[in-house]
Amino acid sequence: NAGVTQTPKFQVLKTGQSMTLQCAQDMNHNSMYWYRQDPGMGLRLIYYSASEGTTDKGEVPNGYNVSRLNKREFSLRLESAAPSQTSVYFCASRWDRNTEAFFGQGTRLTVV
Amino acid sequence: QQPVQSPQAVILREGEDAVINCSSSKALYSVHWYRQKHGEAPVFLMILLKGGEQKGHEKISASFNEKKQQSSLYLTASQLSYSGTYFCGTEIGGNQFYFGTGTSLTVIP
């Protein structure tokens, strides 16, 4: 019973490098989300996917791209990492708007 | 889009009560509440839907004022295990799901 799985758990990047954060859920949820968490700023929505085949921007999409590969997987890509993208990233999923969201364990990303 | 929470931080002694508030500038379909322990993922506490339906925690209650776009979380007879950061999550439609800035709660013996 894995729930929401994020990989990797930790990553250090140099400025300008690219990487993809992976997220997979095994609960057959329709909606998936990517958030970043910074001290004092709470959880801010980067991108979301209301259903398979759709993606939309959240509050802070600049510098990121996403892919909803299938119903299970929703990846977040940083094309050219910047120090301002140092953060903890959480993926979440839920069945629909009337149900709770489940979170992955987070990815701690440091850009130097 | 991000809802505003107050207070930012609160310290309680065991057995005391606390109220955490969440306010949005947008019309809300629902409000969720989550708790996050240090270094862990947020965990669901409860959901309040438009129309009054509530789902969730047995020992924690909340209210949702749809007209004022506000919600409050009530923690009564606090226990040490209640310590953590509390987030409200607001659904404004189209599956857009935004979280607040968080309220740090510390319960001391």
Image (cartoon, grey):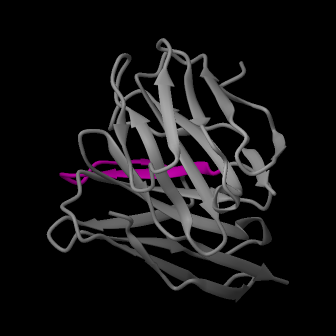
Which residue lies most toward the top here? A70
The quarter of the picture where residue A102 lies is top right
| Quadrant the N terminus of chain B occupies | bottom left
The kind of secondary structure the magenta stretch mainly shows is strand
Q: Residue at x 61, y 40 (%)?
A: A78
Whether B56 is drawn above or below A25: the answer is below
Residue B109 placed where, x, y %?
85, 84
Q: Which residue is drawn at 66% across and 71% down?
A: A39
Q: Residue at x 64, y 65 (%)?
A: A38
Query: Which contiguous range is marked in magenta?
Result: B42-56
Whether A44 is drawn above or below B71: the answer is above
Identify which residue, A97 or A41, lies in the foreground. Answer: A41
Does the magenta portion include B53? yes
Identify which residue, A79 or B28, lies in the foreground. Answer: A79
Does the magenta portion include A54? no
Q: Residue at x 21, y 52 (%)?
A: B50
B30 left or right, relative to B85: left
Residue B57 placed where, x, y %?
53, 52
B23 left or right, relative to B108: left
Which residue lies most toward the front here? A16
The quarter of the picture where residue A57 lies is top left
